[in-house]
Image (cartoon, grey):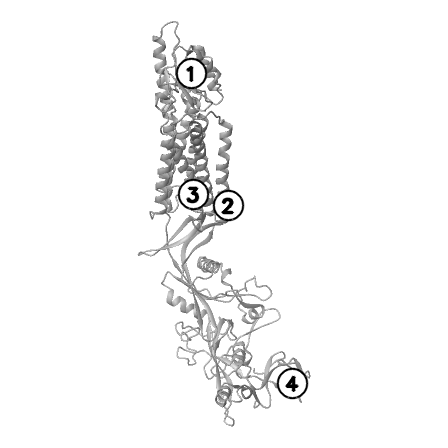
Amino acid sequence: PCLMHPGQSYIECIDGCKAIQKCPDENSQRECRQLFDDNEDERNSCEEEVKWCISYREQIILPENDGAIAVNNAKIVNTSENNYHSQRGYIPWTQHCIDSSGLPTQTPGQNSVPGPDNLHNCYHSDGSNPVQRNLSGPYAYCGIDSDDDGTATPIICNTTFIGGFVSYNYDPRYRPWYTKTKEMQEPNWSEPYVFFQNDQMGISYSHPIYKTDEDDGRKVFVGVLALDLTLTGIASFLIKNYDEAENIVAIIEEAEPNYLIASSTGTTGVKKVLKDDHSIPCPEMENFALASEICTTVRIPVAELKNGFMERVISNSYMIQKKNGFPPSRLLPVQSKDDTDDVEVAQGVHASQTKQFTSVGGINWRIMIMSPVDIHEDDSILPGDDMFPFLVTPAIIGSVVCMALLLLFTKHRGEQEVIASDWRFTGAFIFGCALLNLACLSLIGPNTDSLCLSRMWFLNFFFVLALTPLFVKTWRFYKLLGDGTVIPRRQSISHAKTTLMMIPFILFEVLILTIFTFVDPNRAEEMLEYDDVGVTHRIVCTHDNSAFFAVQVVYQGSLILVGCVLAFKTRNMKKEYRDNQQLMLTLYNIALVGTVILIVANVVKVYQGTIRIFLSVGVFWMTVFSCCVFVLPRLLQIHTRSSISSNRGRRSQPGRAQLPSAPSTVAIDSGFCASTLQQQQDHVEGANIVSSRTLGTAVENPANFDLSDGDSSSGRRVSFEPILNEETIQAIEKAANR
């Protein structure tokens, strides 16, 4: 049983293994006499670090009469006699059945393999045939062999050493842990590799052993003391210590591709696959010898762990940690998912943290700990949530109310009161308010990248879309009529020109949103919060920095601020120009509500779901109040005028034309020509007539309509006696309607 076969390796001594040479490590290769020729102490210290290794070489058995190949120098070595395989033997490495004390035993239930805490029967390498023999007698069975047809044939081995049940041709001087230690001449940890005796993956801690030569005092390397740790053993240690804990602990290699060492879930990061195709798992086989021929053990990078939920937690944690550069003192949130009926369903959230672990001898691992955390869902509002109605109801009611007011307003656009209110731009503002309420519906749903980005666009764009017609209307009102203290110069600003003024403001907002969509978009970000109770997981919509917030506050705030200033300057305008009060109320209302929303969102510590409800209610109040301020007074004026006119018509005297009753207003639109008024110049008292083409300039019913600043001494007064006939009034109304 100890005969070697062609293709097997053996060690051949040089000079009877008495010749020694300097070991290959850096310290031993130094020439101490040359380096420290003038310093005896340093030279002696240098020579003490020199190690000497016995000279031998590894060779391979060839068929009869072919000699042997020297592996080290890749040359054929011709020896004085033929190297028949029948003439070469090996010192066997024997496997025993041992008990928890390390003594040979075959008593059922006392075998300590694989460990003292897991005693069971002693089996052969096939895992099914028990070892049956007395310690002093022959084996009845010691393994299996594979026939040509693949069937297993028992092997009777009665020539192995007493106390063992199987032996191997094992020489540690071939093994990587031994050769590495010989080259380094210092303690070290090996990389994980497949163990010879059990085909398991493990690591070895190796320490060189020396003796002092009696003749010359040289330090001679004579062997290696090694300690083996299987990856399964490391996993068992983690399972034992974290079995009842909710935490998951995984150990991975620091070097790429970051193989898994072990985990508290029992995953060892190795798998048996076919030698020809590593993507195919090794089939279950009773024939251990055949399985060894066609299968091999390979390692699994941690990123490829996919078998079950726990492995997904480890894999996802690793990917997120790697993406963030393995921050040593920062917890990172990890959402783990599992496939259920082809639908990915979130199974839980863990807080992940890593710490680098290094040890003397070359171990460089990373320990990764994953702890389950509570999920906080108050940052989003979903259908079915308790807070869902508080978000949806204001948005829907606000849009419906604004649209209803818009329809009523446009329905009466031919009325003098609505014409005086500049119904086109007022209607555009009301329509924008309805869209802004509908934009609040984008706040429904989870915080995802797409929804967060859509909310950034919808809310800001529709706010500027609603604010712009109000702003240009205020500006035109101020530009044409001034602040009410002096008579403005004659000028005209048409509807088309005013509409074109709106476009740059809207396009500038689109430009801002487009830039930040690519530079710093509003996106979903996972975060962990710490408190006295524990760690909480949140998903919020946020930007990387506050640049977007600052730009929007400056731009939108400037529009509101300038609008408020212009509206304030027109506060002294005669009440005949009705819209100055509505503009001032609306802009001040927007400024006040917007300020409160900003304070709550950025100063008060509340969850985003609460902020969204507050935002929806704030938009509702801001838009509905503003629309009502513009529409309801006009509708009331129309109703009042209609009632008074009807009553006066019944009491009017025959042959005398009646003007529309006070406080009605006849509006002179931008297309109105002053010639209509000039036709009645003979009935006008005073020498000066202000015939401005100003939009919104109104001629009211009372006999004395004053455009002055209140000082009657200025002489600038236009008076209309109530002798205008019905034909003249109709002409004015037609011109205004055009």
Q: Nearer the viewer, residue 371 or 670?
A: 670
Q: Amino acid at mark 3?
A: Val
Identify the residue under disc 4: 83
Q: Residue furthest left?
A: 532
Q: Secondary structure at mark 4?
A: loop
Tag 2 near tag 3, CB within 8 Å: no
Q: Amino acid at mark 4?
A: Asn
Disc 2 to disc 3, how far (Cα)? 16 Å
Disc 4 to disc 3, how far (Cα)? 92 Å
Q: Position of residue 394 (x, y in %)?
A: 37, 35
Q: Position of residue 689 (x, y in %)?
A: 43, 18
Q: Nearer the viewer, residue 33 or 4?
A: 33
Q: Amino acid at mark 1?
A: Ala
Q: Quadrant location of the N terminus? A: bottom right
Q: Amino acid at mark 2?
A: Ile
From the viewer's perspective, is residue 677 above or below residue 361?
above
Q: Residue furthest top?
A: 654
Identify the residue under disc 3: 554
Identify the residue under disc 1: 687
- Pointer 4 or 3: first along the chain: 4
Identify the residue under disc 2: 515
Q: Position of residue 440 (x, y in %)?
A: 41, 38
Does residue 157 show up?
no
Disc 4 to disc 2, how far (Cα)? 80 Å
Q: Secondary structure at mark 2?
A: helix
Q: Nearer the viewer, mark 4 or mark 3?
A: 3
Q: Position of residue 71 (x, y in %)?
A: 62, 80
Q: Secondary structure at mark 3?
A: helix
Q: Nearer the viewer, residue 236 or 564?
A: 564
Disc 2 to disc 1, how far (Cα)? 59 Å
